Amino acid sequence: MNKVKTLADLKRLKSELQAKVELREKGENQEGRVVIKVGMATSGIASGAKEIMAFLIEELDKRNIDAVVIQTGDMGYCFAEPTIEVKRPGEDPIVFGYVDKQKADEIIEKYIKNGELVEGILPDNYQSID
Amino acid sequence: MENIKLNIDNKTVEVPKGTTIHGAAKQLGIEIPTLCYMQLHDMNIENKPAGCRICVVEVDGRRNLAPSCATKCEEGMVVKTHTTRVLNARRTVMEFILSDHPKECLTCAKSGKCDLQNMAIKLGIREIPGIEIAEMSTYRKDTSPSIIRDLDKCIMCRKCETMCNDVQTVGALSAVNRGFMAAVAPAFEMNLEHSTCTYCGQCVAVCPTAALTEVDHTPEVLRVLADPTKTVVVQTAPAVRAALGEEFGMKPGTLVTGKMVAALRALGFDYVFDTDFAADLTIMEEGTELLDRIKRHLAGDKTVKLPILTSCCPGWVNFFEHYFPELKDVPSTAKSPQQMFGAIAKSYFADQIKIDRKDMVVISIMPCLAKKYECQRDEFSVDNNPDVDYSISTRELANFIKQANIDLNNLEDEDFDNPMGESTGASVIFGATGGVIEAAVRTAYELFTGKKLQRLDFDELRGMEGVRSATIDFDGLPVNIGIAHGLGNARKLLDDVRTGKSQFHAIEVMACPGGCIGGGGQPLHHGDASILKARAAAIYEEDRKKPLRKSHENPFIIKLYDEFLGEPNSEKAHHLLHTKYFDKKKKIIVKQ
Amino acid sequence: MTKYKMQLLVCAGTGCHASMSDELLNNLIYEIEANTLENDVQAIKTGCFGFCEKGPIVKVMPDNTFYTQVKPEDAAEIISEHIIKGRKVDRLLFTDPETKEHITDSKKIEFYKKQLRIALRNCGFIDPENIDDSIARDAYMALGKVLSEMTPEEAIKEIKDSGIRGRGGGGFPAGIKWELAAKNQADQKYVVCNADEGDPGAFMDRSILEGDPHSVLEAMAICGYCIGASKGLIYIRAEYPLAIDRLKIAIRQAREYGLLGSDIMGTGFNFDIELKYGAGAFVCGEETALIHSMEGHRGEPTVKPPFPAESGFLGKPTNVNNVETLACVPAIYLKGAKWFSSIGTERSKGTKVFALAGKVNNVGLVEVPMGTTLREVIFEIGGGIKGGKKFKAVQTGGPSGGCLTEKHLDTPIDFDNLLAAGSMMGSGGMIVLDEDDCMVSVAKYFLEFTVEESCGKCAPCRIGNKRLHELLEHITKGNGTEADLVRLRNMSTVIKDTSLCGLGQSSPNPVLSTLDNFMDEYLSHVCDKKCPAGSCKELMTYVINATNCVGCTACARVCPVNAISGERKEPHYIDPAICIKCGACMEKCKFDAISIQ
């Protein structure tokens, strides 16, 4: 629990946390680890995102893949929920839609392990300010 | 106070800042029609939900029409009150309201006196488009001892809600449901008699339609009058004589006592008595009670309850039983004049004329709707025979007289019958706020000090302010008097009694603003306090003209005690003329 | 480690599919295999890129090459030139229409700037239940900057200069609202966030609250500093339990970090936030009704003036802003009012989030700069009309808005343009309608909602809307007359003109705009008793085509009301007087013999 007592504190905290995020994405592996974000807003959850997230966490662990699975808000592709964003180390993240357990399994085996693309890619069509 | 200038219908007018367009127009003599707007001048109560949208006007620079009752004037505003846009809007909105209103004018209690009907007539509505396919919001009807609710006729003006919540602080009525089915009703749409309603009838007094009306007991009265086996006795409250004339075109404040008696005789009542007689009796009992408590208090008795509260107003008693039941030992145990009258009529008088009480019917003419409920209270009957059989309001009496084709204006004055028709000036003033306690003071002073009063008019107890107080010097003993009219004001005094902060020895409470002269059963005054003031003036005038002005000097009262009761608070008096109160704090049990 | 050296992504969205992207993909795969590259090169189909007018699209990874208008016969060249020889096929590269340059990197294409996420900047990037994620992405930095470097007046000026207008539907300049609240003196003031998103189908605010709650908390604190309030209230509808949870977590975490509460960041500024729950009333999205609801009273609007800035919650100066408006605030302070006002049109600055719904392929949340045209949103970002049907209208602004037609498609979206076109921005609902939607039914649908949600206080809305709905029902049942259309217009105009609050003032908009733009449909309903879109049941007749009917009796057997008669092997007949138009017969018929007229 970091108490932010001044603006300087906040700035320092931000740098620390940004470093932390990078670290999270790198992991222990020198090459970095896979970061998966699961869209867990109401539209995602209503389509089964909770189960997919649980599945991913369990299976990645079982299959010994160094990855971190995080929940996130609405990515905007409501017509294709559940959606997940998969970022392989050193590559641009790719968003997959219509992810059921079977598709999640396919994504793990083909894309996460081998970089082989599978169907259901949702090309990004927006930019966010930072 | 800053003034601003604006332009209405091409005329300039200057008004103080904060005036509404409606008020500014009035200054120019333009009366913009309204339906839900109500201002009770001297009570500082305004009902302006701006919901009926009848009073809309065009304002330059404003996209839509503005409700003139709720829009404040601004410097340089340009207002138009009768463009075709306004007239079309007003008419269409009226058509909407009428499309959701029952079309039973012919048999409706308010026909001829209905604000909605008058507005429809004014706007010349001849047909309602789409009426064939129009669904109507309907509700079940609800009758209570005093008030009938027919919500099909509610137009959501919220006047009753304002009176019940803001003025009376009873809170029995509020808006329920949403949208088309919205209406103003008790919580959970329960029956009025299960709610905290006190039957003060102020809601009925302000309702523009027949959504809220009084229970009409004239058919029952007619029935007993027509029954040859019954001896029908009638008593009239003091406030009635000061207002009845208004229903016959007389100006407010015209005393019609003699004509009223003549009309009642003409209607067929066997004995026309005066409630004022019983009011004198009330003073005897209550005055004695007041003195008794003061004496015990002066003697150091810590258990005695002070202040003593008057108990002649059933609306007030109801309010009390709902909201301050833990204080139910505090009010006077004396019954109201109406009930004392009934008790004495069906015992003392029935014996005198040698008839069984079951063959006597006692009718009361009251300015009040709560009296209808009061005479039905279980404790006010003997072997299921009520002391007072029916109570009808001033409005009902007026209708009754008109139905009987009696021309009140041209009747010769007549006198009350005896032995229950003689009264002193003290009893007449019961009708105005402050009157009961003033009457009590006149008697209590003389009984306590043994001296004769130098002045009989206690102006410090009179007036229209909601909460008043005065100290009367009882020959060295200062007696603090508190007065409240309107239940919201009563609540303020009662809160102090509850917390022990009250400095008063006696408090008079009237549920209706103005006292009984402003009762729920009186001719409607629409918030015009000058009418109330005129009626009060008439009451005090009759008091001044009376030869006897102190209750304990009424010879028939003296005779009643000598022959029948013994003395005030004797066992018989206690049995006949005193009562007790009940805890009515509502518990609502929610079943799962 | 990727197994593949190069990957080709072929758009398989409806538009590209129609232009033979399937064949293109097959050809690419064929070429890959023909050159025995299948272990190094992968070709796969993806979802819609949203760039439909330039399709079929092929994107080559990892070099991000973006090919447009690729034909199936181009497959060979792409493989041989780009994949094998490393030379990009210039003629297929996307050409910027302005500079006429070939763009090789998809990231540089203007198209991707079509959607610019400001309010949604963090949604999908952070874990909303972890404040650290937010802080790493600059949460509370704007608050820190404002508290330590700006006076309240300067901070208000920044919002005024940005030009941001309320995103909840009113479109009132937020800066002026803040200024008014700041001017009124009182011992206590309040900042209220209106999270009672009531428009059916709208979920912009929900997504922001679920995906980036801290942006709203931070904005409220900044507003508190500007106007002199130390208390914030979020009025959130009870139908958003997830958003409520995430807000609670966010508030708790912000308090733990000292970013809410007393002496924030050591500046002496106190601000804390409380949640208040709605109870299922659309009308409580109106600010005065909202305030009364928070006070424990019946959720009814009251006349304005007085405005909440003068006398609001508990009679104190109160500033009420929508979730999306607030979400933009921190970005304005961090990147500057100048930056914000450089986006959008002259009188509508910044971006707007729309909930794109209806008969469009890519339903979802879209955030575009003001000035983007409806065509771009619906046909590019939205991916065009579902099932290849014909576009009919787009309903903007929820039940308070109007329908815009084909001729309005090139309207740049902003507050004033939409109003001038006969609709409004509203809170951002955008429902796309196609040829199968009956406009009279659409108007009736919206009236159903507003009739249900009217509070009942004022006569025109309480009764007028009901009458309007009844009349529309009457018309869709085939019982209307031309005179009824005149009545519809008059009632609508008067309801708009006389209603007390925004609900009634805008509920007739769907009726008026459909009367204006689709009078032919109304006339068809009342004069011909026919529904051109084939949607109004009572006006449809189910008919059996005698030529196709073989008399198998399957339809007669499924008819729940025995409306179909006929002998075996003889053409059957549906009695229109008995038929309840359930459609069961049509579903059952294997011979395509039943149709709707």
Image (cartoon, coloured by chain):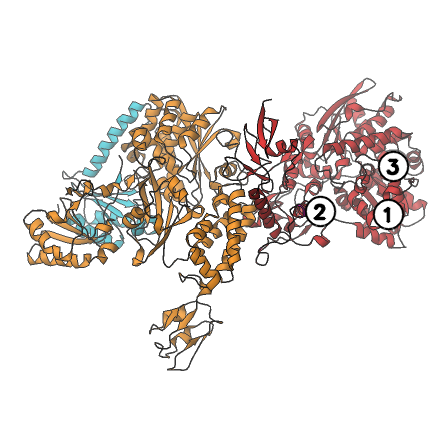
> Chain C rendered in what hue?
orange
* Residue B125 is a magenta residue: yes
Report which residue position mark 1 lands on. Answer: B406
- Where does residue C90 sit, x and y in percent of width and height? 11, 47
Amino acid type assigned to the residue bearing label 2 in the image = Thr
Residue at point 58% right, 22% down?
B2
Q: Looking at numbered disc 3 in the image, what kind of residue is underneath it?
A: Phe
Q: Nearer the viewer, residue B549 or B6?
A: B6
Question: Closer to the N terminus: mark 2 or mark 3?
Answer: 2
Please provide the residue range marked out in magenta.
Answer: B121-131
Identify the element where label 3 is drawn.
helix
Quick check: marks 2 and 1 in contact, CB under 8 Å? no
Q: CA distance from mark 1 to mark 3?
A: 26 Å
- Report the quarter where the C terminus of chain C lies: bottom left
In-image side of A110 versus C461 (left or right): left
Q: Which residue is mark 3?
A: B277
Label of residue C48 in the image: none
Q: Which residue is mark 2?
A: B213
